[in-house]
Amino acid sequence: MNPATAATTIGVVGAGQMGSGIAQLAAASDFRVVLHDADPDSLRRARHSISRRLGDDGDAQSRLYFASDLTDLREADLIVEAIVESEPAKKALFASLDGLAKPSAILASNTSSISITRLASSTSRSARVIGMHFMNPPPVMKLVEIVRGSETSDEVFEVVKSLAERLGKTVICSRDYAGFVVNRILMPMINEAFHALYTGVATKEDIDAGMRLGTNHPMGPLQLADFIGLDICLSIMRVLHNGLGEDKYRPCPLLVQYVDAGRLGKKSGAGVYMYRNGRL
């Protein structure tokens, strides 16, 4: 059997931007999907946004179920967590999922920086735990970064790789180091852009224009940070700094200051830039 067909039902935990995007992508790719969130408002927003994005694709919408009870994920073949980027929160969730998911189920984390080996240690199925890092927004971005923990089996890796390809993604593979590949490179660049702004090298507009026009990036690093969420950027920089132990990964004080002030980026209406109705 093709390993991509081994999974028919995908569970997604967390109905935020990433979770709802992963759920939409999976439903549009012919999987039955159960999207879970304990917050009814989050589920309601996710239902509305997914329905709007899927439009006339009634078949995809019919394959998507919304659940506020974690036990509704009992029959999922693959469960992808897409909750807050917090190791204690993810470990607690994985312990709960381990107790209710069927023995054959694969538990995947959409973490962008946290050790898969440490997350797997909170379960009794380390061989069936893997990192499956989608880029934002999942229905659009072509990449999935797969991260094997120290105990992840070859079988699980092949199933998840084939499934990601069935979702239309290109796969890259990373060893289980802090930040993996993408954020190991991206986040220090964003952090350095904050240092350039913090020390007055240039205005935010000129820093972003320089990277867009001078290096052909589609979006400047400061605007990208706003899009990702400054709190998430800060969390990843702290994981890099703690995990790799080098001072070059220390978060810029301006990034810390913005997060402390509640300037989290586009989602809060203010970050490096100011937003109105989600627009600059």
Image (tube, rainbow, N blue to C red):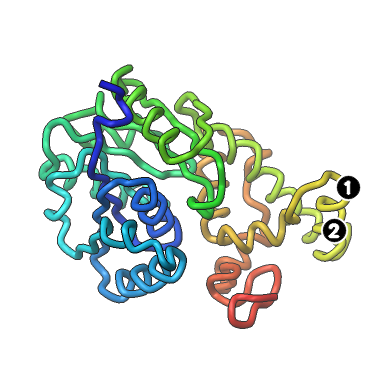
Mark 1 or 2 closer to N-term?
2
Q: Tell whether 47 sits left or right of 240.
A: left
Kindly check if marks 1 and 2 are in contact, taking CB atoms under 8 A apart as contact. Answer: no
Q: Residue at left 19%, top 44%?
A: 76
The part of the image, by quadrant, that contains residue 45 is bottom left
Q: Nearer the viewer, residue 168 or 212?
A: 168
Q: Position of residue 63 (x, y in %)?
A: 26, 56
Q: Secondary structure at mark 1?
A: helix
Q: Secondary structure at mark 2?
A: helix
Q: Distance of mark 1 from mark 2, alpha carbons?
A: 8 Å
Q: Residue at left 38%, top 52%?
A: 28
The part of the image, by quadrant, that contains residue 188 is top right
Q: Residue at left 21%, top 38%?
A: 77
Q: Which residue is mark 2?
A: 209
Q: Which residue is mark 1?
A: 214
Q: Which mark is residue 131?
A: none
Q: Position of residue 44 (x, y in %)?
A: 31, 74
Kind of residue sitting beneath label 2: Ala
Q: Position of residue 150 (x, y in %)?
A: 35, 21
Q: Position of residue 169 (x, y in %)?
A: 50, 38
- Residue at the outermost bottom position: 276
Kind of residue sitting beneath label 1: Gly
Judge the density around disc 2: few (<14), some (14-19), many (≥20) Cα neighbours within 10 Å.
some
Judge the density around disc 1: few (<14), some (14-19), many (≥20) Cα neighbours within 10 Å.
few
